[in-house]
Amino acid sequence: MINSREVIETNEMIDKENLDVRTITIGISLLDCGSSNLDELNENIYKKITSTAKDLDEVAGKIESQFGIPIVNRRISVTPVSIVGASACNKPEDFVTIAKTLDKAATEVGANLIGGYSALVGKDMTKAEEMLIKSIPMALTNTQRVCSSVNLGATTTGINMDAVRLMGQIILELADASKDRDSVDCMKLVVFCNAPDDNPFMAGAFHGVTEGDAVINVGVSGPGVVKTALESVRGESFEVLCETIKQTAFKVTRVGQLVAKEASRMLGIPFGIVDLSLAPTPAIGDSVADILCEMGLEYAGAPGTTAALALLNDQVKKGGVMASSYVGGLSGAFIPVSEDQGMIDAVKAGAITLEKLEAMTCVCSVGLDMIAIPGSTKATSISGIIADEMAIGMVNGKTTAVRIIPVIGKDVGESVEFGGLFGYAPIMPVNKFSCDDFINRTGSIPRPVHSFKN
């Protein structure tokens, strides 16, 4: 039983430690919107979204007032558009009309972002999926709120290297298309291995085909809360360290559970999952890197960083699953560079490189996130970075992702300002040695032998 008394106990976390509900996300199935007529399909999609999510903003505001809990974003995720638009779309430009419809619907209901301009191509690509991927630069530069994701592999299927190669090119095209704004639209695109169906966090949210007609997923974040809790146990044993993180994660997850249940009741939409992810912001004190330093590291990236991050991620999940039977999504610790002041400081100090970040992704929630690289980086090098991250996910049976921003016209030593929750980022160097001959092979990397479980 969850009651408001538990939320009152967390008031100091909210007031002083940057605890927030990062998002209430309504997942909406568009499978019943299908039509071979593009105009009819767009009309169906618009009506479905605006009717299902019409009260989203109002309900979020009421919950904020009732419990005093900041809800930073109202979001929507939809069925992957490559599936929904397959019958009606004959060229990439047709898919772009759907992106514009999603944008219009999200604006109408007051959603900050809408995800699901997506394709799931972990094993192979249909013609429709390839068209959607090729439409991404045009779609994202012509919309404000649409986010896109592409799943390129899975432990059970291997890695679609043809799609990996294509995505390196698409990311550069998108960077060039928004170069007048420091390639900012690349923030709205992420590639995955083992993408979850119930992720409320952008840019990777989509409404999985195994989900129902609509669902409420809530994402909670509290790096500042965990750091403050750890300040009281400096020098204590690993057992005390673990218990402190676990207990704090429990309290934070209970807040998310309360908000999710209340939103579900008020909207008349089933509750799905709480995603407890330590997702940082540029605000001082709201940093995953600062948690690692509080554990005893001079900077994130120092020797011991991967071990400290593994401990943090595991204890966050243990605390979360004790607080709610429905913890899902990505749940754990995010390490986006631009959104975490401590990570930015570590990059500037030379404590973190792209290679160290890759090692850390073996044990964190997701992967290489919000990393700015020189705009002169080759498409094959971007594909190589993606392939490395997909391999980590495939072999370890975990979700991994890459959200990378090649900033056209900028190089190592410069920085780029994204604004808001996205922060700013120093341009990080990329290994200059070529992987062209590897990336230009055709076909797929087979699934690992331990995937054969049935």
Image: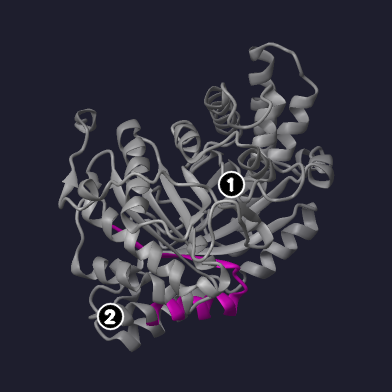
Q: Which mark is residue 233?
A: none
* Closer to the camera in the image, 200 or 184: 184
Q: Residue at x 65, y 37 (%)?
A: 349
Q: Is residue 250 above or below residue 37?
A: above
Within-10-Å neighbours for mark 2: few <14, some 14–19, many 20+: some
Q: In this view, does 216 lie above or below 453?
A: below
Q: Give the range drawn in magenta.
A: 97-120
* Closer to the camera in the image, 393 or 165: 165
How far is disc 1 from disc 2 in space, using C-alphas?
A: 41 Å
Q: Which residue is drawn at 76% across and 52% down?
A: 69
Place residue 145 in its image quadrant.
bottom right
Q: Which amino acid does label 2 sit on?
A: Ser
Residue 68, percent from left and from top: 80, 53
Q: Which colour scheme is used?
A: one colour
* Closer to the camera in the image, 324 or 365: 365
Q: What element carries label 1?
A: loop
Q: In this view, does 391 lie above or below 21?
A: above
Q: Indicate yes or no whether the magenta region holds residue 101.
A: yes
Residue 427, percent from left and from top: 56, 52
Query: Are the residues at dot 1 and dot 2 in contact (C-beta closer than 8 Å)?
Result: no
Q: Which mark is residue 337?
A: 1
Q: Which amino acid does label 1 sit on?
A: Val
Q: Look at mark 2 in the image and give the residue it sits on.
A: 35
Place residue 13 in its image quadrant.
top right
- Quadrant in which the N terminus is drawn: top right
**Marks 1 and 2: which is nearer the front?**
1
Q: Is residue 126 above or below residue 20?
A: below
Q: Indicate yes or no whether the magenta region holds residue 197.
A: no
Q: Would residue 79 be seen by someone viewing this image from the given angle?
A: no
Compared across the picture, whether 180 is left or right of 116 comes to right
Q: Would residue 94 be seen by someone viewing this image from the given angle?
A: yes
